[in-house]
Amino acid sequence: MSSANVLIRAAGVERTVVEEVYVHPVDPVKVVSVRPDRRWERRPRCGVCHERAPFYDRGHRRRWRSLDDGLLRVYFEADLPRVSCPEHGVVIAAVPWARHGAGHTIPFDETVAWFAPGASKKLISQLLRINWHTVGSILTRVMAERDGQDGDRLAQITRIGIDEVSFAKGQRYLTVVVDHDTGRLLYVAEGRSKTTLRRFFDLLGTERSHALTHASADGAEWIATVVAERAPNAKLCLDPFHVVKWAGDALDTVRRQVWNTARRAGMKAVAAQLKDCRYALWKKPEDLTERQRAKLALIQTTNKPLYRAYLLKEQLRKVFAPGGAERVHLLDAWLAWAFRSKLPSFVKLARSIRAYRTDIANALTYRLTNARVESMNAKIRLLIRRAYGFRSVEALRAMILLCLAGYTRPLPGRT
Ligand SMILES: [Zn+2]
């Protein structure tokens, strides 16, 4: 083997023969003139689908940026022949050193993917001499390839959590699916609809979808529908945190109503008192300050409906606080109480809770909350900020998958 070919093997490129290496006299760059090895050359393949395809023409000569050699930039240079693919027509042939449509070699792409999760934007851009949006394009093609190959990532999952995260100032959404048992991200895709979620189940396949035993979610109708349709054996668990939040909203409706009534009746002192009792009503009793405790005591004596609403909210929180199968009857007792409460917002809440009773009882029985998904979402929000400057949602998705889906990626040349 010639020393040039030893070098190219060391650069992490396979099935490639070096024809010539020279340093460009004007720009200080090193150009490595290459071609695929004989075996590769004799069996050309379509760059898109990698299927065998007949040779079409020699194409043009072009360059790919590779990893630097010391301070010198390195470019691969080769003819890029075209093939005539039965499916894709006349397209550029696959080459062993770069991905289809890429302007960088595979080891360069892999190095970017290795740096992207942890290193600062500035470090990556300066060290590798590329724009941040180029990092986005590279991650997109690296992950598109990896995602397609790595079906096993979805093997042996039984309990999943489903949620959504907003981005682009709340204008767009990502649907997120997490494995409860490993905490790994299983799926992320743009949108929050039945179609988006169905694509996850398509990826999972019928057999594995049917093997799912539990799915947690926040009560969104589109999630419940698709889970029932695709994972018939999965018990849907409605996240208790969201149920308690609904109760907080119902309580706030009561507070606003009594405040408005007092204000209209000209009861200024009462109105003022109600206006700033929001936190006292909202906080957990054990976290109340002395002042807030006094406010609550005052409400207890002066405003029966509001105090009743407060007790209902607190009782519902306690139903979920430890959870457990034995809490289901407390939930039913709470429902009966709420229906009798004469507080319209709580009667309405009781109706929704009754509609979801099975899913809420499941969450109590199996103690499955959406906490794992919420913490995943927090990590995703950080990555959304990090991906600022990428030019496509696919690049954002690639960054999220790369960082959170449990892929291990060695640096080229180190295994
Ligand atoms: Zn093809």
Image: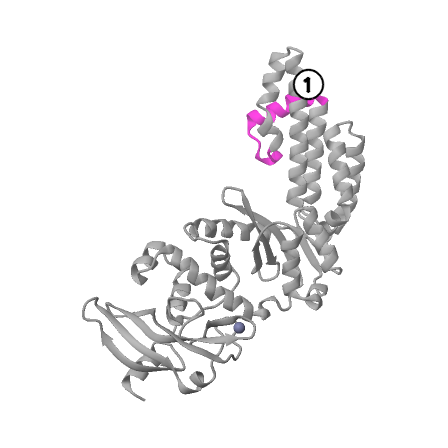
**Residue that lies at the very extreme toward the front in this rendered image:** 57
Residue shown at 63%/25% (left/top)? Answer: 296
Q: For residue 96, say whether it is visible.
A: no
- 242 to the left or right of 29: right
Q: Which residue is mark 1?
A: 302
In this view, the residue in front, 120 or 170, is 170
Decide whether residue 297 is among the magenta residues.
Answer: yes
Instruction: For the C terminus, give its image quadrant.
Output: bottom left
The answer to whether residue 64 is left or right of residue 359 is left
Quadrant assignment, res 160: bottom right
The percent position of residue 270, horizontal first and vertical second, equals: 63, 15
Note whether 179 is above or below 23 in the view shown.
above
Category of crowding for the residue at label 1, using alpha-carbon neighbours closer than 10 angstroms: few (below 14), some (14–19), many (at least 20): few
Q: Quadrant of residue 353?
A: top right
Question: Residue at 75% across / 49% down in the picture?
Answer: 361
Residue located 49% across and 45% down the image: 168
Q: Is residue 289 magenta?
A: yes
Is 303 drawn above or below residue 404 in the view shown? above
The answer to whether 316 is drawn above or below residue 393 in the figure is above
* Residue bounds of the magenta highlight: 283-304
- Secondary structure of the residue carrying numbered label 1: helix
Residue 183 placed where, x, y %?
57, 59
In which quarter of the view is residue 308 placed? top right
Amino acid type of the residue tagged 1 in the rendering: Thr
Residue 374 x %, y %: 57, 49
Q: Looking at the rendering, in which quadrant would you find the N terminus?
A: bottom left
Is the residue indicated by label 1 positioned so its CB lies within 8 Å of ligand 1?
A: no
